[in-house]
Amino acid sequence: MADLFIELFSEEIPARMQRSAAAELERAVMAAFGALLPAGVETFFGPRRIALSAQVAAEVAASSSTERGPRTSAPEQALTGFLRKHNASREQLRQEGDYWVLEKSAAAVSAAALIAGAMPGLLRRFPWPKSMRWGGSSSFVWVRPLRRIVCLLDGAVVPFDLRDGADDGHGLASGNLTEGHRFHAPGAFAVSGVTEWRERLTARRVLVDAEHRKQVIAERIAGLATEKGLTVMDDPGLLEEVAGLVEWPVPHLGRIADEHMDLPPEVMQVSMRVNQRYFALRTADGAAAPWFAFVANVQADDGGAAIIAGNERVLRARFADARHFWDLDRKTRLDSRVPALDAVTFQAKLGSQGDRVRRLVRLAETIAPLVGAEPADAARAAWLAKADLVSGMVGEFPELQGVMGRYYALHDREPAAVADAVRDHYAPRGPAEAAPASPVSIAVALADKLDQLTGFFAIGEKPTGSGDPYALRRAALGVIRIIRENGLRLHLRHLLSAAGADEATGQAVFAFIIERLIVQLRAEGARHDVLSAVFQAADDDDLSRLLVRTDAVSTLLQTTDGADLLAAYRRAANILRIEDRKDGPHTGPVDAALLHEVPESGLAAALESVGHVTALLAQEDFAGAMALTSRLRVPLDLFFEKVTVNATDPELRRNRLRLLNQVRSVMDQIADFSRIEG
Amino acid sequence: MNPDAPSFQELILRLHAFWARQGCVILQPYDVEMGAGTFHPATTLRALGPKPWRAAYVQPSRRPTDGRYGENPNRLQHYYQYQVIMKPSPEDAQALLLASYREVGLDPLRHDFRFVEDDWESPTLGAWGLGWEVWCDGMEVGQFTYFQQVGGIPVTFPSFEMTYGLERLAMYVQDRENVYDLDFNGAGVSYGDVFLRAEREYSAYNFEFADTAMLSRHFADAEQECAALLDRKLALPAYDQCIKASHLFNLLDARGVISVTERASYIGRVRTLAKGCCEAWVAGEG
């Protein structure tokens, strides 16, 4: 075995891309050097480098194989094509029977040769989310300029460069030089392998291991906080990002001026976390502390005094901006802002935000009684829902829409349920956000999304394969989640028509929601094919009922009875498909007098006993309906085993086909089983 | 106030001296109103074509919507950008940039300099590039971009573009929390002495009194003139009209008379002009 070490040293890599880049490097190495059986792979990533170490075989052993070619009698082109495909010449061929046979032999390849040959291509094809050109005319791209390539095998440089014809590849070639901390240890130095690399970089104030950096940050911030009797708000996403912004983490605490401590926590959060990547701290009793934690990348000679003063100053300016809007906004009542929405375009063809609010009021009022909300509260919340869009704070920090509306509503002494709905009517905005659960919020949130879907579908702005500029998929998924997570019983078609959809638009939106539901079930690993089958049988616009029914069918199919019944159904459906083409359809009553054989009358009797499945479905006793239907399984199997459907007597044949047709009809009430996979 | 800190004008002079040493031609501000230093033809047009180019200049940047009648300590409708362009981008662009901060008194072993992801895009110029916000102690003190496309045209050689917000940088090195308190010349003149009245009057003009019907007409005129000049292959005069159209759009925007959809259409119209000018420029460079 030999020790392979690769480091790709560049200008600063965006923090969010580093981890996946290291994973891509590992994937690419495993694919390109698979023949060297890489083992013990370890990857590293940070602001200026991604790296990988592994043990690899010293060589790929020599091998030989044979490949059968075209017949000797085949036209010349066939042989030429075969040789081209295998990059071989005529001399390597011998005749074996009527065929040409190619003797392929591969000489042993050293690991160094294989790696040197594969690396340029691997780097050229590296899948950065977004890459760029720089400097001269080279077409070699990287996430930001790539400055050095270290590639070592047992300490020796594996030689290759990035030249490609006339392209100079930025003059980049593999070597053994890397760089330490940009300010603490400028200049290049040589390394011979991963262990030395790690040690010498640590001495040059670079911690190469992201997990190590995260640990250092978390521990030191916690330590600093403890000294002040504070705790750090847990924030794994921020920790991950910050660890990607520093090579040598030096945490500090900064002070928040007391006069800003009454700002809403979400406002402080936007400034601190989103804009500045600061950690929030809490006092012992859980309240927001007048301190923040941040991480510098340099061990300053004044102990960080200038850095702390600078960061405090930045936050002070940001909070002063926010405070200006917070104080100003509360001087105006939220409901007096509503008329200003008439001047804000929602979408050219769909009118202003004011128009939209008037639609939302009507729709939320209609939905309210169906979800247990007071219609007047839902109407009031809908009326106020968009008013914060014309507030100063939301103009400055658009991500605070809804959140600020709630604060301003509470300030105006609106009922709490109304204020909550102003905030929560946007939810859920993504998988991480909870769907609203209180009735008024549910009413307005549904109104918001149904109006959005109806409006955009009506003007022909449906999402396409590549684009969904108005986030309609998210809106549809929001409707689905609100209904599912609250177990709501709603008739979507009715609501869509209340949202102003004409029949065609309502149908299109409804089909779109069902399509998203199927996609969602698939993503959850559930039986989306069962949902399709159930939906085909019962064109139901009550999603909750559809899902209960789907669950019941899925449960049945998981049993042996269910699987066998499905098989028998398919057999019946196949026979009918073929026979119906000859002289079908075979509808009509079964003639009891023609049921000569025991399994025939058995099946007929079973069908009779299953007759009230229709009633059970109507009562929404889906489990009961499934249990009942599964009783068909034994008689049906027996029928297929003992009875010849295509009897020579045409009367008998017709009667038996009718029997099967009834089986299919009964089962088709539950689901279109022909759509079920597996 | 840091007594050793450079005055506002001294800061500019130090940057001029530094970038002149790097082989940049030191240009004066372009005499057409614009929203950002990138619009200067020395950047937009010169970023295209194969000829090497290095320039540095101060450009007054007008952002009508950012006016605050002189009442906000951090916001101005007229401020200065210091702009550097080097084509092709040099190997040591990052190091040069950091050295320039040292020139104005910011030591990277005492302050925390960072390159934080920031993809730059100008929809009106049909331009984009990748780079960073440059942070000093948590504050953005500049934008660093490797141009990839300008006027819808992929660049022949990527340029390094650096934009410093001069007022913000000066506030930091002078340790001032109000822009109007900046020491302008080291001899008793403050930034407020020079600009406070202008901020008040222009804010009133931008938000209240600009004649929107006239601005719309001027926009159409500039658009028409630009197209006519492009027919004559006069890239530079045509481009002046493009910059004017862009600024007129910004004024209309500040008056709040442009709806969301109209906005997209205005941006598209300016982009069409910019694209035409860039194509004409490249064609004329042979």
Image (cartoon, coloured by chain):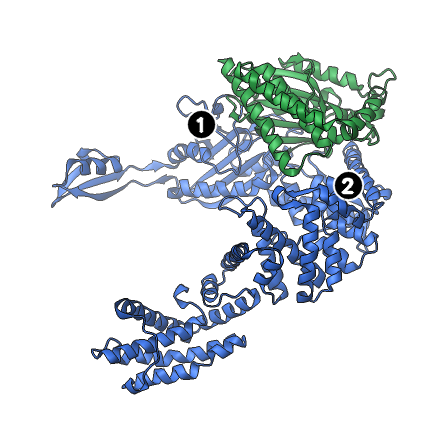
Chain colours: A blue, B green
> Quick one: label 2, few (<14), some, or many (20+) residues within 10 Å?
some
Looking at the image, which residue is at 31% across and 67% down?
A: A577
Looking at the image, which residue is at 37% across and 43% down?
A: A35
Looking at the image, which residue is at 51% across and 17% down?
A: B282
Q: Amino acid at mark 1?
A: Leu
The dot on residue A531 is none
> Quick one: label 1, few (<14), some, or many (20+) residues within 10 Å?
many
Quick one: B102 or A470, which is closer to the camera?
Answer: A470
**Residue B221, position in %: x, y?**
63, 21
**Residue B152, position in %: x, y?**
53, 27
- Identify the image quadrant of the N terminus of chain A: top left
Q: Is residue A319 left or right of residue A669?
A: right
Quick one: B26 or A49, which is closer to the camera?
Answer: B26
Q: Which residue is mark 2?
A: A392
> As displayed, is residue A397 above or below residue A446?
above
Precedes in sequence: disc 1 or disc 2: 1
**Residue B5, position in %: x, y?**
80, 21
Q: Is residue A619 left or right of residue A157?
A: right
Q: Do we see residue A420 in this rendering?
A: no
At mark 2, the secondary structure is: helix
Q: Which residue is mark 1?
A: A162
